[in-house]
Image (cartoon, rainbow, N blue to C red):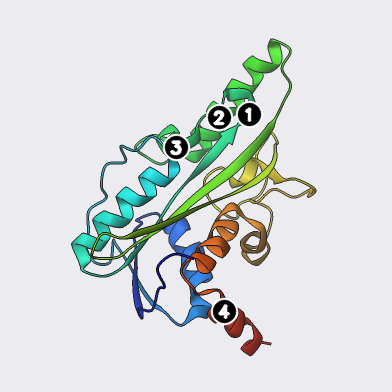
Amino acid sequence: MGRTFSEKKLVIASHNQGKLREIRDLIGPLGIEVVSAGELGLPEPEETGSTYIANAELKARASAEGSGLPALADDSGLSVTALDGDPGIYSARWAGPEKDFALAMQKVEDGLQKQAASGNTDRSAAFVCALTICWPDGHTESVEGRIHGDLVWPPRGANGFGYDPMFVPAGQDMTFGESDAGWKHSISHRAVAFEKLLKRVGLDQAANGAGDNAG
């Protein structure tokens, strides 16, 4: 186990509204007050890391230093097997400055169609999520979670965000875009990473207790 998290307030180092909703939902049962980097007026640092964890640590450290509070950052993306892991850490950038994920999904599909024309019909992919907590003294604890599945076309469903409408988790028949938030939270890459993080910082018992109290 890493450093124990005992503070009562946490900054979510993100300006992405979809991620903020999911992280708030995951943290809710722990009784920790959360505030977003956007609400504090903290700028988004440039993501210069070469891995998900490097980018998560970069974002968490910037918010911890800017706020004087511990900060939780997420870096996540879609890794497509036939595209050699792309878009990967550049998943958000594929959506362009307007964050147009319809465009990003089309780019993924175009790449898969090119592969298919060459005989590679593999449509498997994985969502990956790195989570980092950084304290104001610079100490970090980081974990990574992933969920495997396949990509469908055309996209299905209006729930979730990002690439959710084209991703079907392994063993399921609905995309994340077609599923309700509760079901996604229970199996997603972010949920897997969050469970690991709770154990790492000693909050897993608090989460279990909150669940018991909720019936």
Q: Circle 3: is it few (<14), some (14-19), or many (20+) Cα within 10 Å?
A: many
Query: Which labelled disc corresponds to residue 205?
Result: 4
CA distance for labels 3 and 2: 9 Å
Q: Secondary structure at mark 2?
A: loop
Marks 4, 1: nearer the viewer: 4
Q: With 200 as the anchor, is 37 left or right in this view?
A: left
Q: Is residue 191 above or below residue 119?
A: below
Query: Which labelled disc corresponds to residue 89?
Result: 3
For residue 109, say whether it is visible: yes
Q: With 159 as the anchor, is 133 left or right in this view?
A: left
**Which residue carries the number 2 mark?**
85
In terms of depth relative to the viewer, which is nearer, 18 or 67? 67
Q: Quadrant of residue 4?
A: bottom left
The mark nearer the N terminus, 1 or 3, is 1
In the rendered image, residue 54, in percent from the top left (x then y), is placed at 37, 44
Q: Are marks 1 and 2 in contact (CB under 8 Å)?
A: yes
In terms of depth relative to the viewer, which is nearer, 140 or 77? 140
